[in-house]
């Protein structure tokens, strides 16, 4: 059997139906094998970074691995941003790069390059992958694929890169005669659940922090069951948004640097934080760690023991397990319900310091938040949102009202502009019947234009939302705060321009709608806009834009700007 045919058959057996990539000389055997397999489809994208991030969207929507391929050299290096993103956000993707023939590869020769487009991609990506290997022996392909699949999905998920020379791809192998990957199961230390249960049951002011690990584990229903039983309030990290419906009374909102004020105020009042599948990074806690949870303890649940052991917060009980296992045990064993006093406190705090109140009191240009209300209104149960990086990400994270079964995909760790469009493409191929809103700022939209062709080409169910304020708004807010409003590279005066989006829509054969302050409340027009399967919806935002609340440096999380007199 030809090696490239085996690779495709392997993914077919793992129920991967789509492989994203950009064809090139060193990957032609693999793309041809995909073409010849009637149960697989190769999606020729228009930039390798699109392939890399689309595979992440596919993985997040299916819960399976995503797969992206590229040729050697520039094809491989163009995927690096997506590979790094998958690593920092723990997304299981297998990236396969073509490589020059083994007899052209330089190996240890002290030269820069021997083969055309030869690049040592493995050395480049090792720090941003769970595993990376040059497969230069055809008889290792079964072993390495099985190993890659297991590593990508086990424990804390993440990306794997396999670099496969062209002559290895076209080699013939006897599958039954080459080695398989058989690794001994990791010995898991038993958890002493007794002190954990006692700590929860003695708590007077508990709160749950839901992170990305909860979504990755598919534990949303378990969280709902626990909250139904206990009435413990829930806050979420940026990457945990959507795991618990905003329609629930117990949902307080997002914490962190741009978190909802009510959520950031509630956490320090708690005597017990149950942190589920989150790193508790400084974007959540703020740099004043002693102000995060001054009078309480943290039950820190994470599958990654290294993450648990290398955190600066000291008031933690470390629980190395999956969120699903933790919630399954706790929900079955716990006999607890929060006091009426705590329920009244978090209910009142949510009402007094809601995002709606924040917008009313502290936001001068309310249009961006009005857009989030419109998207919430026109979205339905089960719909998917993908958000780019910048103000658009924080407006949506703060103010989208997530319904049951809705999903919110964004980038947390690496945060590359241009994320939303290719992520939405990957999610659409994974779930072509689901409505998707791709939220973009004008900057990230411009970076990811190549993805637009795929939307029209395959009639994908993606409404491309462009929040156009003709600026890189997140940085202008930073420049105003620290650089005396010198908007270098972020406004027209500083050298930043936005293309004519209507003409771009025409070029990519997509419907175009323009929303301004004059027609944003025209319900008949908005009904027409959001009835389309796909297209570009440009919201023109005039004037300066702000995201509030915002945590400034050297402030505890309950003192976000604009500061309140009481705090």
Image (tube, rainbow, N blue to C red):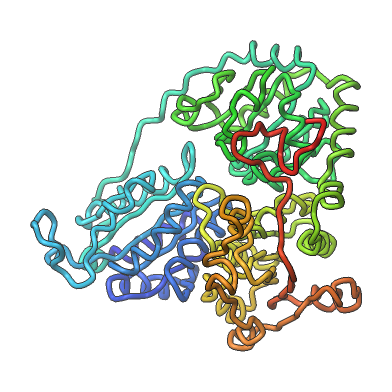
Residue at the spot 41% in from the left edge and 28% down from the top edge? 186
Res 203 visible: yes
Tell me residue 160's x, y (percent).
Answer: 38, 50
Q: How many numbered marks does the figure carry?
A: 0
Query: Vertically, is 28 above or below 245?
Result: below
Q: Which picture quadrant has residue 288?
A: top right
Q: Quadrant of the C terminus?
A: top right
Instruction: Looking at the picture, tell me which residue is in the foreground, 371 or 381.
Output: 371
Left or right of 126 on screen, residue 518: right
Tell me residue 121's x, y (percent).
Answer: 28, 58
Query: Vertically, is 325 above or below 125?
Result: above
Q: Quadrant of the N terminus?
A: bottom left
Left or right of 71 on screen, residue 532: right
Instruction: Looking at the picture, tell me which residue is in the foreground, 58 or 535.
Output: 535
Residue lying at the far front of the rendered structure: 484
Instruction: Looking at the picture, tell me which residue is in the foreground, 39 or 450.
Output: 450
Residue at the spot 69% in from the left edge and 59% down from the top edge? 385
Query: Vertically, is 175 above or below 38?
Result: above
Residue at the spot 56% in from the left edge and 48% down from the top edge? 412
Q: Which picture quadrant has residue 382?
A: bottom right
Left or right of 311 on screen, residue 248: right
Tell me residue 395's x, y (percent).
Answer: 72, 55
Tell me residue 473's x, y (percent).
Answer: 63, 61
Left or right of 255 on screen, residue 458: left
Residue at the spot 70% in from the left edge and 11% down from the top edge? 198
Res 466 visible: no
């Amino acid at each position: 059997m030809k090696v490239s045919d085996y690779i495709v058959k392997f993914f077919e057996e793992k129920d991967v139906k789509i492989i994203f990539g950009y064809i090139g000389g060193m990957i032609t055997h693999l793309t041809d094998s995909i073409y010849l397999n009637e149960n697989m489809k190769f999606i020729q994208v228009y930039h390798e970074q699109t392939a890399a991030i689309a595979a992440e969207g596919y993985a997040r929507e299916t819960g399976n691995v995503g797969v992206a391929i590229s040729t050697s050299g520039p094809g491989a290096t163009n995927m690096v941003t997506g590979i790094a993103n998958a690593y920092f956000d723990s997304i299981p993707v297998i990236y396969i790069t073509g490589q020059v023939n083994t007899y052209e590869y330089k190996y240890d020769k002290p030269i820069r390059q021997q083969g055309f487009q030869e690049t040592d991609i493995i050395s480049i990506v090792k720090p941003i992958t769970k595993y990376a290997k040059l497969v230069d022996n055809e008889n290792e392909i079964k072993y390495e694929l099985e190993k890659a699949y297991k590593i990508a999905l086990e424990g804390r998920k993440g990306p794997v890169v396999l670099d496969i020379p062209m002559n290895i791809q076209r080699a013939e192998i006897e599958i039954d005669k080459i080695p398989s990957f058989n690794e001994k199961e990791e010995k898991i230390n038993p958890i002493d659940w007794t002190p954990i249960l006692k700590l929860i049951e003695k708590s007077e002011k508990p709160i749950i922090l839901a992170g990305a690990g909860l979504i990755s584990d598919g534990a949303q229903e378990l969280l709902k069951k626990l909250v139904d039983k206990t009435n413990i309030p829930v806050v979420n990290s940026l990457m945990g948004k959507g795991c618990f419906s905003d329609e629930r009374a117990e949902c307080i909102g997002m914490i962190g640097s741009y978190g909802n004020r009510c959520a950031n105020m509630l956490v320090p009042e708690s005597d017990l934080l149950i942190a589920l599948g989150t790193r508790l990074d400084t974007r959540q806690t703020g740099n004043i760690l002693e102000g995060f949870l001054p009078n309480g303890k943290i039950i820190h649940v994470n599958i990654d023991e290294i993450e648990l052991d290398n955190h600066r917060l000291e008031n933690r009980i470390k629980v190395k397990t999956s969120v699903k296992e933790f919630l399954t045990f706790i929900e079955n064993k716990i006999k607890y319900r929060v006091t009426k006093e705590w329920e009244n406190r978090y209910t009142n705090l949510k009402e007094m310091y809601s995002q709606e109140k924040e917008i009313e009191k502290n936001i001068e240009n309310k249009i961006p938040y009005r857009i989030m209300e419109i998207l919430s209104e026109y979205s339905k149960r089960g719909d998917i949102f993908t958000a780019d990086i910048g103000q658009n990400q924080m407006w949506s994270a703060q103010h989208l009202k997530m319904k049951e079964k809705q999903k919110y995909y964004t980038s947390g760790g690496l945060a590359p502009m241009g994320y939303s469009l290719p992520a939405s493409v990957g999610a659409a191929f994974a779930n072509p019947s689901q409505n998707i809103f791709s939220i973009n700022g004008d900057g990230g939209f411009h970076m990811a234009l190549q993805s637009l062709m795929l939307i029209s080409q395959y009639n994908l169910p993606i409404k491309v939302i462009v929040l156009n304020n003709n600026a890189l708004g997140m940085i202008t807010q930073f420049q105003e705060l620290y650089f005396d409003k010198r908007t270098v590279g972020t406004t027209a005066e500083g050298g930043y321009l936005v293309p004519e989006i209507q003409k771009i829509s025409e070029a990519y054969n997509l419907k175009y709608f323009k929303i301004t302050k004059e027609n944003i409340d025209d319900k008949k027009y908005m009904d027409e806009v959001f009835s389309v399967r796909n297209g570009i919806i440009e919201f023109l935002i005039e004037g300066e834009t702000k995201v509030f609340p915002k945590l400034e440096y050297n402030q505890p999380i309950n003192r976000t700007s604009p500061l309140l007199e009481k705090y």
